[in-house]
Amino acid sequence: MLSHLLASPKLSTGDLLALQGARLAEAVSHARAHSPLFAELYRDLPDTVTDPAMLPITHKPALMADFDRWVTDRGITHEQVEAFLARPEMVGTPFLGKYLLTTTSGTTGRRGVFVISTDELRPVSGPAYRPSTAGVLLSPLRTARLLAKGLRAATIMPATGHYAMVSLWTQAHGEGNKRHQRFSSLQPLPQLVAQLNAFDPAVLTGASSIVELLAGEKAAGRLRISPAIVMVSGETLSDEARASVTKHLGASVIDLYAANEALRLSKSCAQGWHHVFTDWVVFEPVEADYSPTPAGTLSHSVLISVLYRRTQPVLRYELGDAVLQRPDPCPCGSPYPAFKVQGRKADVLRNDDGQPTVVAQHLLIALQKRVAGIRQFQVIQEDESTLRLRMLPADGTDLDEAWPRVHHALATLLAEHGLARFTITRSGEPPQLSAGGKMRHFIPLDA
Ligand SMILES: [Zn+2]
């Protein structure tokens, strides 16, 4: 049956679900055979599982706490992984000769660490799973622009760190070349704008919050680039932001909704929906009590099962995004179900002139890089000119001793971004979780 489906040129929604069921059975059977943690978790399940609803729900903190028993390669330990991640020069290079390591942002208390081999990504590396302009309008003008600019591609990302975007990019392009250049998202905006003006890319890729800032810079006349394609990732691009980026940058927008857990997750279409690759990923929008959320309603969270992962099983795992499934078929004709995503919106700080200037999250990543000894920062905006800082020290760090260094580093960063008006105060409490159990790195004034 499977070979027949795989040979078919165009899969129907039913075909996708049949493939999903068969692949889920394989993924579950592999996990319980090779991961001691999953063997225990799935002890009472029947031999073959094709219905995801039969699986217990898993959560990142518990899995990370039991990392060595989570992975299916007994040669991988959390200790080795952390030692590798501590070396920034190893970004994008193979861990143990064959694995790509990625992490979630270092500003969270317990960051997620993800291990995948290129073999595991191979099934989802074909043209059907690649971001492409096929679904978006690439007018003759944009095509001409793409070619005229020699397909030059600018990617904006943190300068270092084993983040998924950095690891994947470095794996593909090394230090970069004439056609593929990287630009630090942690530098002051005017500097980034000047660098992009000089490079004049045909394709621009970056976190949606940065891309939104750049659309504003273009509208203000400071940014002069006219890319044919803009690819956004990391956070949700609202419909308004998409319209602004399309209008000001004049580009076709491709929204790369993905996660460390699922590096290949979806493809965006011209109608602005994310089509999730349901032949390889089970995507279950759920309510707070984990009952299924009907299509047409915004969910509380979403559970994912990533069926191409073997080394580190991600099965019925709470991803946390609030999503809305389109109840009717998408006019673009894709057989994959269409979703909108909410809940990863970034907070942008405005400089002394009232211009949006930096994404708070990026500022905290930059701070983390400059100050050693702090595991976690959380910034609360008290008013138009005061930021209160909560800190969680690493083992062996004395906060009283560290505070002058932290204060100096943050004040310097703020000044670099035109945010010198802010006074920084120190909070006596550690970072707090939101009512929904999420760690927000930045709590804005209107929160
Ligand atoms: Zn569509």
Image: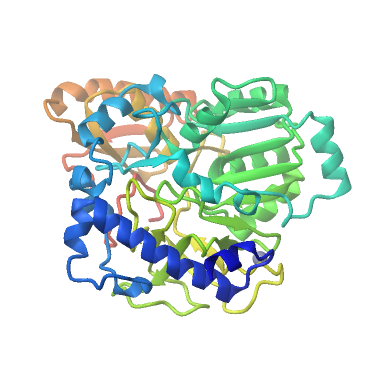
26 relative to 436 in the view: left or right: right
Q: Position of residue 375 (x, y in %)?
A: 23, 34
257 relative to 383 in the view: left or right: right
- Using the image as rendered, state which of residue 223 and residue 349 is in the foreground: 223
Q: Vertical placement of 77 versus 276: above or below? A: above
Q: Where is residue 154 in the image (x, y as percent from the top left)?
A: 64, 31
Which residue is painted at 27% across and 46% down in the image? 72
Which residue is painted at 52% across and 54% down in the image? 236
- Using the image as rendered, state which of residue 183 and residue 311 is in the foreground: 311
397 relative to 418 in the view: left or right: left
Q: Where is residue 436 in the image (x, y as percent from the top left)?
A: 29, 62
Image quadrant in which you'd find residue 365: top left
Which residue is painted at 68% across and 32% down in the image? 153
Question: Quick check: which quadrant has ligand 1?
Answer: bottom right
The reply to whether residue 104 is in sight is no
Which residue is painted at 17% across and 31% down in the image? 394
The reply to whether residue 398 is in sight is yes
Image quadrant in which you'd find residue 293: bottom left
Q: Vertical placement of 407 versus 318: above or below? A: above
